[in-house]
Amino acid sequence: MRNSFIPPERILMGPGPSNVHPRVLEAMARSTIGHLDPKFIELMDDIKSLLKYVFRTENEVTFAVSGPGSVGMETCLVNLVEPGSKVVVCINGVFGERMKSIVERCGAAPIAVEDEWGKAIDVQKFEDALDANPDVKVTAFVHAETSTGAKSDIKTLAEIAHKYDCLTIADTVTSLGGIPLLIDEWNIDASYSGTQKCLSCPPGLSPVTFNDRTVEFIKNRKTQVQSWFMDLNLVLGYWGSGAKRTYHHTAPVNALYGLHEALLLVKEEGIENAWDRHKRNGKLLVKELESIGLPPMVKEDERLPELTSISVPAGINEAEVRAKLLNEYNIEIGAGLGTLAGKVWRIGLMGYTSKEENITTLVNALKNILNN
Ligand code: PLP
């Protein structure tokens, strides 16, 4: 007989997943009940109200899609994008590119607004693209680009989009719970996130939120949503308020116990305090890394506190350093992706990982490795 799998104890300081809070792990180990059990429906209602709290929204259609962030991304896009339409997609890293690819698979034409990786989305370029394409109805952009560590000003992007009567889809996978994100105040129409970043929860679920204008837009589609699983009209038969809560798919019951506990933790800490903690620790990390000759890649006003990219010093084998951190110190950090592969390390301080002692442990380990 094979042995059970016992994972090593790692400090997860990469781009996600981050370390999971012990209370979340404990919650996930509780007995599974039926996904239509009245007690489970109560839990779902509580998850919805806690998600509204973290998203800072009153949107009734706020729930967790059964699937990782990419499924949340597809859910937003397949519901809002009709074949033959045009969608403005901002690209300043891997995840903007992924959105563009999904738009193409929806049979629509993406209009890419491209910016250099490591920089925020240029709001003027975004406006120029909308000005040049008056038939666009949907726009999409990433708040926190995990592939680079750059933050974009989605409040201004949403203001511009609405001036042109367009809907906005914001990727908030790495921003939810980590940096200020005000869905209602900023007028974000649809957004998807992930559980494995700043919520201290394992991967596998995608919190989403849609405002009334977006739900109306989906109802008025001329064509059927091309995905059965992600068709919001069908999913809401299970998750919708006042819905009969009929079978749609078998929800990942224990994963939802975990998300509930993770959201309670954010509520207990207070979301503003969670934002402050991420900010404080992000600044401290940069200061400590600079003191050992490792400056950040992204300029300060566009830098995410929860994900810092640092340029790999000349002559250093970046993969070897990461392997030593993992094998000798049990610390995981991330490599560069796409055009930044081999050039940067990505260091995450997300959720439960975002604490001072982790910064000290990592910086000491890096000092030892780089000096030997
Ligand atoms: N969007 C962003 C900004 C991400 O960082 C990620 C994952 O790292 C995703 C989307 C996709 O999420 P997942 O890997 O959970 O499918």
Image (tube, rainbow, N blue to C red):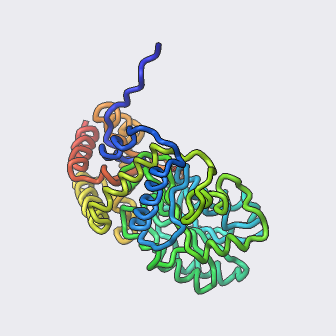
Describe residue 96's horizontal placement relative to residue 45 as left or right. Answer: right
Q: Is residue 257 above or below residue 179?
A: above
As drawn, which residue projects farthest toward the front?
38
Residue at the (20%, 48%) spot, across then down: 357
In the current view of this chain or complex, which residue is farthest to the bottom?
Answer: 163
Total number of numbered labels? 0
Residue 54 drawn at (x, y percent): 39, 65
Along the line of sight, the residue nearer the viewer: 145 or 340: 145
Name the side, left or right, on which 322 lies relative to 372. right
Judge from the rendering whether residue 22 lies leftward or rightward of residue 122; answer left or right: left
Q: Is any part of residue 171 visible from this angle?
A: no
Q: Is residue 145 above or below residue 371?
A: below
Picture coordinates of residue 79, whole percent (x, y): 67, 64
Image quarter for residue 264?
A: bottom left
Taking depth in this image into account, of 163 and 43 the one nearest to the observer is 43
Residue 333 location (% of width, % of height)? 37, 44
Q: Residue at x 53, y 50 (%)?
A: 68
Quarter containing the C terminus: top left
Residue at 33% from the left image edge and 41% from the top image edge: 26
Q: Could you say where residue 24 lies in the image, as x and y percent from the top left?
A: 35, 46
The quarter of the displayed image where residue 235 is located: bottom right
> What residue do we see at 30% from left, 46% from top?
23
